[in-house]
Image: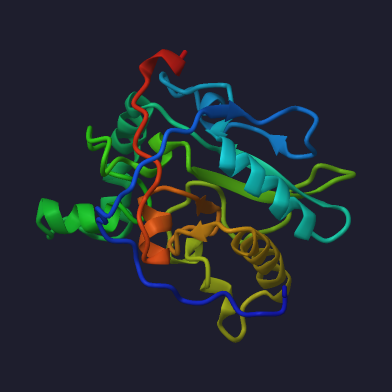
Amino acid sequence: MFYRRIPNNRKLEIYKEKDFIEEELVEIPDDCGIAVEMQYPLLEMKHSIDKCLVRQSVLYKLLKAKEYLPKGIAFKILDAYRPLNLQQEIYDKYKDKIIKTFNLEHLSKEEQNNIIMKYVSIPIDDEEIPPLHTTGGAIDLTLIYEDTKEELDMGVKFDEFSKLTNSCAFEEKGMDKQIRKNRRILYWSMIKSGFTNLSSEIWHYDYGDRAWAFYNNSKAIYKGINNKKTSK
């Protein structure tokens, strides 16, 4: 399955179809074969959390996705559940950088936000159309070699803002073949286990939130959990 091209999927829109369920947040176990290196504590974000929290079904599907990986390759999670105050902090930190990078200064605020939200969810305090990571259904992850723990080359860094972060960016002729292969392994192992991918970010995958519902033409099952008690 890793020889298939990564498709150029439509860009995420605000999506409101929902049929919420109650499901707890759980921490990724240390002994499950999935590495964790939460990035925002490393970046010294004030509201970052050290625990890697996801919904129970997300953990189950991650473990399923792990079974599809080639021998010697493992997942490393970079970020998962975020409280709303962390989402606000990330938005405030990166908003101006995204505007400058993509030359958005001449656009209206609404037009700017339509592009910003491809990379950072707008910190809307609304549990029914929440920022994706506040649901516990969104995860950012990459691949590592099990023996060395070295990350496979994805062609971009986490939270980089460029056209190369688009999941299908290396599908074009002339692009690096090894990076293309690495991206396909990550993408198809996650898709096969039931996740969807945010097409503007190769590292971002969803289950149960409004992005997952949008790409599946279904209803979101996870609402936002704006719990500030989980922050430092």
Colour convention of the picture: rainbow
In the rendering, at what x and y percent does residue 49 appear? 51, 22
In the figure, 1 relative to 13: above or below? below
The answer to whether 96 appears left or right of 204 in the picture is left
- Of the pair 223 and 100, the residue shown nearer to us: 223
Q: Position of residue 127 (x, y in %)?
A: 27, 35
Can residue 90 be seen here? Answer: yes
In the picture provided, is 69 more to the left or to the right than 230? right
Tally the numbered discs: 0
Q: Residue furthest bottom?
A: 173
Is residue 231 visible to us here?
no
Determine which quarter of the picture holds residue 28.
Answer: top right
Which residue appears at 40% of the width and 48% of the height?
209
Most foreground residue, 230 or 166: 230
- Residue at 35% of width from left, 38% of height from top? 223
Q: Residue furthest left?
A: 108
In the image, taking residue 2 as reference, residue 126 lies left or right, namely left
In the image, what residue occupies the spot 24% across and 53% down?
16
**Vertical arrangement, residue 170 with respect to residue 39, above or below:** below
- In this image, 104 relative to 79: left or right? left
Q: x%, y% of residue 124?
A: 23, 37
State the quadrant of the N terminus: bottom right
